[in-house]
Image (tube, helix red, strand yellow):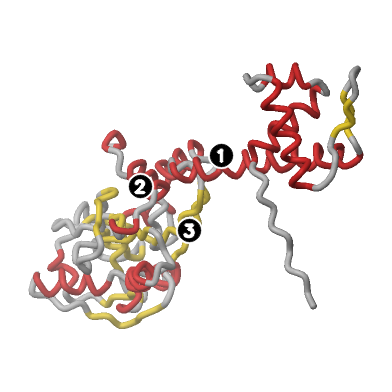
Amino acid sequence: MIQSEHVYRTDLKLLRYFLTVAEELHFGRAAARLNMSQPPLSMQIKELESQLGTALFIRNSRNVALTHAGKVLMDETRRLLQATSQALAKVEQIGRGESGKIELGIVGTALWGELNLRFQRFIQRNPTLDIIFREQSPDVQLQMLSNNELDIGIWRMATALPLEFSSLLLCTASYLVAMPTGHRLAGWDAVPLSELKDEEFITLRTAHSDWSFLQQVFFKAGLSPNITREVLEPQTVLALTSMGIGITLMPDSYSLMHWPGIVFRPLQERIPADLYLIYEAAKLTPARQRLIDALTFSGWE
């Protein structure tokens, strides 16, 4: 027959009393440290010894000494109280939003430009908060948010969301025309959208990119982009563009990377590529709220 593990009813207060006496080896001094009188302290130690079924101190009229069991308990109690203090402090940090983990979804070059600095400062000021960055497309992020696999998402033009989600504008951005250096429009200061009607476009796959949004912009302008190639990665789009195979539209953050053989030009009709922060208000924790407040702080502007 397997014996069940004994459950001890000793509370931390008794152990703190014991440790104080063990450190002082004098009931009077220990009582003074604990701001209590000596008789109740002696009764508490006897209660602890009774619970454990063993003597913890050797007492005589001259001095107090620890038994072997008392020495072992003193070492273990120190470790236990230290671990308890650390655990409670950690929980308090979590409650204040100062500790924990945040699963954060991002898209493409979301971390380029001004948002990069915001994250740098947040991470420096919150070293005990662990941010796990997950690069995913908007549709995948939304699914992961619904499945509690992400805490917060960041993507562009998140203006139409299911009712349970909220969005906050992080920073404004615009789409630029990316073209090879020898393109006929490369010398223009700004390019009208109508000038792109006969161009061949290289894009990311519509289901996994911002191109569903961009196509709507074209359609509203009475245009239909001639998409001749769809690829998986933004760098592939720009590599093919630099070869003169076609042109593309990219958020302005891509222009910060100085792609060889590529010229970026603004559009006359601004197409927004604004970054939004997406979250479910009902699932906010102090840590998530702390990150949201920091990233959307009005003093950034």
Q: CA distance from mark 1 to mark 3?
A: 26 Å
Tell which circle, 2 or 1, labels the residue nearer the N-terminal end: 1
Label 2 sits on what residue type?
Answer: Gln
Ranked by sequence position, the earlier of labels 2 and 3 is: 3
Along the viewing direction, whichever of 41 and 163 lies nearer the viewer = 41
**Residue topped by disc 2:** 289
**Could you say which quadrant of the image residue 68 lies in?**
top right
Q: Is residue 203 left or right of residue 69?
A: left
Which residue is depicted at the point 73% across and 68% down? 4
Instruction: Say if mark 2 contacts mark 3, CB within 8 Å.
Output: no
Whole-percent x, y for residue 71 in the image: 87, 37
Which of the labelled discs sits on residue 133, or is there none? Answer: 3
The secondary structure type at the circle numbered 3 is strand
Marker count (numbered): 3
65 versus 147 height, above or below: above
Q: Which numbered disc, 2 or 3, marks the residue closer to the eye?
A: 2
What SS does tag 1 mark?
helix
Residue at mark 1: 89
Q: Amino acid at mark 3?
A: Phe
Say which of marks 2 and 1 sits in front: 1
Occupied quadrant, residue 15: top right
Q: Amino acid under label 1?
A: Ala
